Structures are given as structure tokens and as C-alpha cells.
Amino acid sequence: MTATKEHLQNMFEYVRWGDGLMMKAARTTPEEGYYREQGISLGSIHKLMVHAMTVQWLWLSRWRGESPTRIESHDDYPTRDAVEQRWPLVHSALLDFLAGQSPRTLARAVEYRNTKGEVFSIPLGELMLHVIDHSTYHRGQINSMIKRAGGTPAAISYHLFSLQKVRQP
């Protein structure tokens, strides 16, 4: 089954919504807790948020025919403010890219090299679903880390996103 452009649009709006709530929830975490290594995933809330953001950009680059040789890291975005300024631009770029797609282009195979130089080929729509799934996976981890660091986690389920959309006039 290939996801439709409309379904992917909705899911990328969900990603933007959820990531935005994560940024707000991360702000409830004290500075020390935000940067503290927790032994989960990449270590700190900050490192994992940077990873979630930069991997979205990495995949967009691959969809555009580029093969980045490295994933940007917390060294490239050393502060909360750097993440908060960059991430909305990444979301906009993802949605702009999707707007230019058609059923045919969503079904086309995207050939790319991973950061190890290995070559893969997967349909664009399937790669987009992967990015959505990857984002959801890491938001769950970030939420747990926020709670452990003394912050207030965000309610980020797809169900809540859907309810919010239904209630909007």
C-alpha cells in the first residue's frame, strides 16, 4: 500500500504539531536537566532533539537527490534556541517538498547512499512514512526524558492531534 499525498500531508502536519509541542515541553526542563546525559538513546534531551530535527533534514536532502556524508549533531546546534529557530524551517521545507509531489513521484524509487556509503533504493512515499515513524519514536523518548529531567511532558498522540483538527472551525 502506498500512502496518498493527502495522507502524507496530514501526517507531516502531525509531525510539525508534535515536534512543536516537544520544543515547548523541553522548555519546562531546567537547563541542567535539558543537557544532562540520561543514558537513553543519544544521551540528553538536547542531543535527541537535534537528532530528530537533523535526520528530517537528512532525508529531505536524500529525496532531493543529495547524499550527505554526515548527520548534523548537537555541535552544529549547541543551544535550545538554535533548535527552536531551525526546526520550523525544516518542517516547512518538508511540507513544501511534499506539495510538489504526485502519485507517480511518490511511487518512484529514491536511490541514496547512507552515511557509510551503502546504496539503497526505496519508493519516496515509503521513505516519507519512515521519517514520520522515526519522528514519533523519538518524541516518545524525549517525553520520557523530559519527565525524568523535571519537566512537564506533552500530550502528543495522533488521537489528540486529530481531535484538535476536528474541533477547529
Image: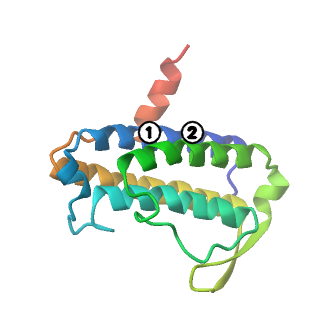
* Residue under numbered circle 2: 13
Left or right: 122 with respect to 157?
Answer: right
Residue pictured at 24% horizontal, 49% vertical: 146
Left or right: 6 with respect to 69?
Answer: right
The three-letter code of the residue at mark 2 reads Glu
Q: Nearer the viewer, residue 145 or 128?
A: 145
Q: Position of residue 102 (x, y in %)?
A: 82, 49
Image quarter of residue 99? top right
Label 1: few (<14), some or many (≥20) within 10 Å?
A: some
Q: Tell me if residue 16 can be seen.
A: yes
Label 2: few (<14), some or many (≥20) within 10 Å?
A: some
Q: Position of residue 75 (x, y in %)?
A: 41, 65
The three-letter code of the residue at mark 1 reads Gly
Residue pictured at 44% horizontal, 49% vertical: 82
Q: Quadrant of the C terminus?
A: top right
First reached walking from the N terminus: tag 1 or tag 2: 2
Residue pictured at 50% horizontal, 66% vertical: 72
- Indicate the secondary structure of the residue bearing disc 2: helix
CA gap, disc 1 and disc 2: 10 Å
- Indicate the secondary structure of the residue bearing disc 1: helix
Residue pictured at 76% horizontal, 68% vertical: 65
Q: Nearer the viewer, residue 16 or 108?
A: 16
- Nearest to the eye among marks 1 and 2: give it: 1
Q: Position of residue 103 (x, y in %)?
A: 81, 51
* Residue under numbered circle 1: 20
146 over 134 or under it: above or below: above
Image quarter of residue 152? top left
Q: Quadrant of the N terminus?
A: bottom right
Left or right: 15 with respect to 69?
Answer: left
Which residue is farthest right? 104
